[in-house]
Image (tube, rainbow, N blue to C red):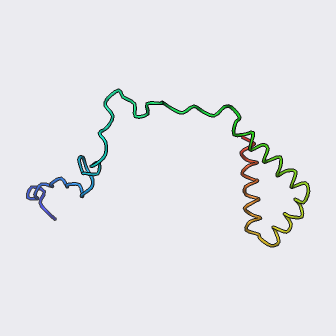
Amino acid sequence: MTDPENTPPIEPKTPPPGFGHNSGRTRGLREPWPAGVSGNPKGRPRAAPEGAGKRGTMAFAKAVEAEFHLAGPAVIRRLRKHNPAAFLQLVALVAIDEHAQLR
């Protein structure tokens, strides 16, 4: 056992190269913005209008639904038989979508 009174003091470790304040990682970059000045002078971009993304999605979903009614059950049976991994992926995607709609 060592005597605490005779042990040398622990020196603080210096950070490894590339770390710490003024480490040189910011060399060649512009100075930071002055206080009170925005780094984005045009401001935050406007949000898309309500439902803008849904229109295209809904049209696609209707097209897929129409296609499903033409040959869907037969295609799903073939997919399950010949490519079980893709079939399980389809099942998972539908289950996730159903779950999201329940919220």
Place residue 80 in its image quadrant: bottom right
Position of 68 with respect to 31 (left or right) is: right
Q: Position of residue 36 (x, y in %)?
A: 35, 26
Most distant residue in the right direction: 70
Residue 3 lies left or right of residue 45; in this view the side is left
Q: In the visual, does 10 lie left or right of 33?
A: left
Residue sitting at the far top: 36
Kindly identify the residue that appears in the image at 24 percent across and 46 percent down: 21
Relative to 96, is 75 on the left or the right?
A: right
Residue at point 82%, 72% (across, down): 81
Q: Which residue is pictured at 13% across the width and 57% down the height?
A: 4
Determine the image quadrant of residue 51.
Answer: top right
| Residue 42 vertical placement versus 27 (above, below) | above
Q: Residue at x 82, y 52 (%)?
A: 64
Q: Quadrant of the C terminus?
A: top right
Question: Toward the viewer: 61 or 30?
Answer: 30
Is 45 placed above or below 20 here?
Answer: above
Q: Is residue 1 above or below residue 69?
A: below
Query: Residue 49: x, y in percent?
Result: 66, 31
Q: Position of residue 53 (x, y in %)?
A: 69, 40
Q: Quadrant of the N terminus?
A: bottom left
